[in-house]
Each structure stands twice: as C-alpha cells, then as structure tokens.
Image (cartoon, rainbow, N blue to C red):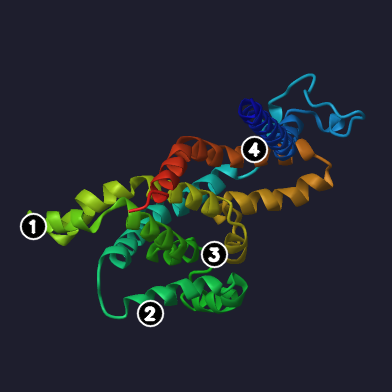
C-alpha cells in the first residue's frame, strides 16, 4: 500500500521542481528582456517623454521619426557597409580555413600534431591588450591604418575557437571508417573534404558562423583603434561617436533608434541559425 504513495510523492516533487524552475527561468527572462523592450520603447518616444514618472512602456503616440532622422543625419549606411564587408570576407574565407584546419587536426596524422594544436590553444591565453600595440605598430608600418585591412586580414587565417569546436564536433559526427571507405572508392583528399566532411560540418559551421557574425558585428575596440575617418568606421564606432553628440542634446531616443538599427542584423542571423546551435550540440553529445 505504501509503494503507490511513494510514487505519487515523487511525481508531486518533480512537478513542484519543474514549476519552480519554470518560474525562475521566467523571472530571469523578464529581467534580461526588460532593457531591450525599454530600448525599443524609448526609440519610439519624443525626447521630452523619456523620463516620465511613472515610466511609460508603451509610447503614446508611437513615432518612427527617430529612425528616419538618425538614418538621414548620420552616416549609418557607411557603417553598415563597412561592417558588412568585414563580416562577409572574414566569415567566408576564415570559416573555410578553420574548417580545413579542424579536419586536419581531427582526422589526419602528421608529425608534431599535438604540439602544434596545443600551441594554437595557447594563443587563446594571450589577452588582446598584450598584442594590441605591436599589431598597431606593424599595421601602421604597412600603411594599413584607417583602412579595413587590419580588421580583415588577421581573420582570414581562421579562428582557434572555431577550429577547436569543429575538431571536437568531427570526433563524434564523422567516423574514420567513412574516410577510409571514401579512399577505397578513389576519392581524393580535397574530394573527401568538400564532398563528405564539409556537409557533415554544416551545423557546426553555421552555429560558429552565427557567433562569429555577432562577434565581428559588435566589435568595438579594433575598429576604434584602426579607423579614424567617419566614412570608414563600422556601425558600432559610429553609434559610440553619435552618443557624445546626442547625449549632449539629451536626445536619447535617437541613440536608442541607432542601437536598434544596428541590432537588427544580429537578431535576424540568430533567428535563422538558432536551429543549427541545437543540432550541433545534439550531435556533439553523441558518443562515437
């Protein structure tokens, strides 16, 4: 007679645990999304209504004039194009190089493989502030300052974080027997990579490309150091430079409108790539 009661208590405890977990996650999500909602709300207000007491979350009236005004008065289009050029070139070439490196480290055997890989991982321990000045000196001697090249060229050689993630992904997603079978069928090494390995890497590459897009698009320190002309600056540096002008005028809706405009590409990319995050993590968790 006692066993059903114990089972019922266990089910009730599980339901209560799930309920408290749901409430905790709900409170956390509200806490995280509230600043974003307030940013959107502020961008739709007149600057005289920003500091109303009590705060008004839904503007009355709703006005999109701030978006039109900030787009016309600032070189946001140049910032968009500069950021887009950097993102497209770095992700297209850099992700391909990273995929090739991950495939080589994951599936090839060559001398000093472990030492080279550990050396690459060791570079992750070096803060950017340590190499910032030497890099600037080197790029200035190449006359690359105030161009997009310092932000593009280093990224063309791949990213160690991407290499490490894809290498770990291939350990479970691509069995070595598949490569051996392709070799027996007469497939060349480039053919194995482009016809077999690269399609298998697609979820991991898409997830890392989305993260890379967000990292490059939101990068502020690098463009701030190397880009001086407003027409050559990226979107984040332009918004930061606009803050000094609009904060002096207490025009917070203009700043928020510019921030929302800069945020739209990141939201779109994350929305379309979120399933690849789940797929890559699910496959990575499968034991070979």
Please give left or right for residue 185 compared with residue 56 in the image: left
Dot 3 lies on which element? loop
Which residue is under mark 4? 260
**In the picture, which quadrant includes the N terminus?**
top right
Q: Nearer the viewer, residue 50 or 195?
A: 195
Dot 4 lies on which element? helix
Dot 2 lies on which element? helix
Mark 1, Cα crowd under 10 Å, few <14 / some 14-19 / many 20+, is few
Q: CA distance from mark 3 to mark 1?
A: 52 Å
Check whether the beta carbons of the residues at disc 4 and disc 3 lie within 8 A of each other: no
Please give left or right for residue 128 compared with residue 42 in the image: left
In which quadrant of the rendered view does residue 163 lie? bottom left
Which residue is under mark 1? 184
Q: CA distance from mark 2 to mark 4?
A: 45 Å
Q: Which mark is residue 146?
A: 3
Which residue is under mark 2? 115
Check whether the beta carbons of the residues at disc 3 and disc 2 lie within 8 A of each other: no
Foreground mark, 2 or 4? 2
Q: Is residue 60 above or below residue 143?
A: above
Q: Is tag 4's residue or tag 1's residue first in the polypeptide sequence?
A: 1
Direction right: furthest residue? 53
């Amino acid at each position: 007679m006692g066993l059903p009661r114990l089972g019922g208590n266990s089910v009730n405890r599980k339901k209560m645990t799930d309920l408290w977990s749901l409430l905790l996650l709900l409170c956390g999500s509200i806490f995280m999304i509230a600043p974003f909602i307030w940013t959107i709300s502020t961008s739709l207000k007149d600057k005289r209504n920003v500091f109303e007491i009590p705060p008004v979350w839904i503007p009355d009236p709703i006005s999109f004039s701030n978006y039109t005004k900030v787009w016309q008065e600032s070189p946001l289009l140049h910032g968009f194009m500069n950021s887009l050029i950097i993102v497209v070139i770095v992700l297209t070439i850099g992700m391909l190089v990273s995929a090739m490196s991950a495939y080589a480290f994951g599936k090839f055997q060559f001398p000093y493989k472990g030492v080279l890989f550990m050396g690459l991982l060791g570079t992750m321990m070096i803060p950017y502030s340590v190499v910032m000045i030497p890099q600037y000196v080197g790029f200035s001697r190449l006359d690359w300052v105030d161009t997009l090249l310092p932000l593009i060229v280093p990224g063309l050689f791949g990213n160690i974080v991407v290499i490490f993630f894809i290498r770990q992904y291939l350990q479970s997603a691509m069995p070595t027997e598949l490569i051996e079978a392709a070799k027996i069928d007469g497939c060349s090494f480039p053919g194995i990579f482009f016809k077999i390995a690269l399609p298998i890497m697609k979820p991991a590459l898409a997830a890392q490309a989305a993260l890379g897009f967000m990292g490059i698009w939101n990068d502020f320190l690098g463009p701030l150091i190397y880009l001086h002309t407003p027409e050559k600056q990226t979107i984040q540096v332009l918004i930061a430079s606009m803050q000094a002008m609009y904060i002096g005028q207490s025009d917070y809706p203009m700043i928020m409108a510019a921030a929302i405009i800069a945020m739209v590409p990141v939201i779109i990319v994350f929305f379309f790539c979120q399933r690849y995050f789940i797929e890559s993590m699910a496959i990575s968790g499968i034991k070979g």
